[in-house]
Every structure is written in structure tokens, then in C-alpha cells.
Image (cartoon, grey):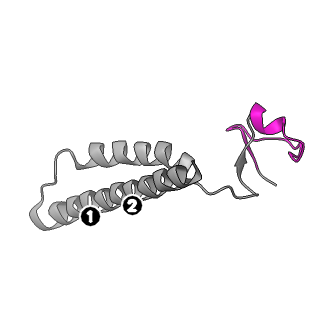
Amino acid sequence: MTKLLNGYCRALEWLLVALLGLMVVLVFGNVVMRYAFNSGITMSEEVSRWLFVWLTFMALPALPPWPNCRPNWPSCASKPQARWSQPDSAGFQLD
């Protein structure tokens, strides 16, 4: 099961890299087109915005379990090693 989850996280990381690369290409291409030819790629801004949103949503499961930024959900609070501190508005606990 651990091997399957590690493979899933690895595939998710590669997908995130591809989305970030596509965003960079779109935005850079749009900047060059606007500067050089005085016209841009029509859908570049909207597509890069949507890619950024999906990149943010998909990056959360791929995050490693860092001790200084972990989700503070009720299932985590029931563990005996969980520390009680004030979570921020997003539900993350910063130690």
C-alpha cells in the first residue's frame, strides 16, 4: 500500500511540474508576443490562472509531512502525539 501511495505522489509531483512548466511557457510566450508583435495569446492569462488554481489544489496531497506545516484536522488532533496550538484561518498549524 505504501508503494502504491508513493507512486501516486510521484506521479502527482510530475503532473505539478508539467503544469508549472506549461504556465511558464504560456506567460513567457504572452510577454514576448506582446512586446515583439504588439499582440498576445488570447487565452494565455485565463489558462495560466486556471493552471495556477489547479496546481495549488493538487499540491496539498503531494506535500511531505513537514513538522512545521501540517494539517490540523480533527483526525490529527485525536492522535496522542498531536500538539495543541492555535491554528491559522486555513486550518494549518505552524509550530
Magenta-colored span = 74-93
Residue 77 belongs to the span the image colors magenta: yes
Q: Nearer the viewer, residue 78 or 4?
A: 4
**Residue at (86, 45) in percent of width and height:** 82
Q: Secondary structure at mark 2?
A: helix
Q: Nearer the viewer, residue 41 or 50?
A: 50
**Residue at (85, 41) in percent of width and height:** 86
**Residue at (82, 37) in percent of width and height:** 77
**Residue at (73, 35) in percent of width and height:** 73
* Left or right of 65, for residue 29: left
Q: Residue 36 at what x, y percent from top left?
A: 13, 68
Magenta stretch mostly in which secondary structure?
loop
Is residue 77 shown above or below 26?
above
**Residue at far left of view:** 37
Is residue 16 shown above or below 54?
below
Task: Report the Cα–Cα distance between label 2 and label 1.
Answer: 16 Å
Tell me which amino acid carries mark 2.
Answer: Val
* Left or right of 57, for residue 82: right
Tell me which amino acid carries mark 1.
Answer: Phe
**What residue did someone put label 2 on?**
17
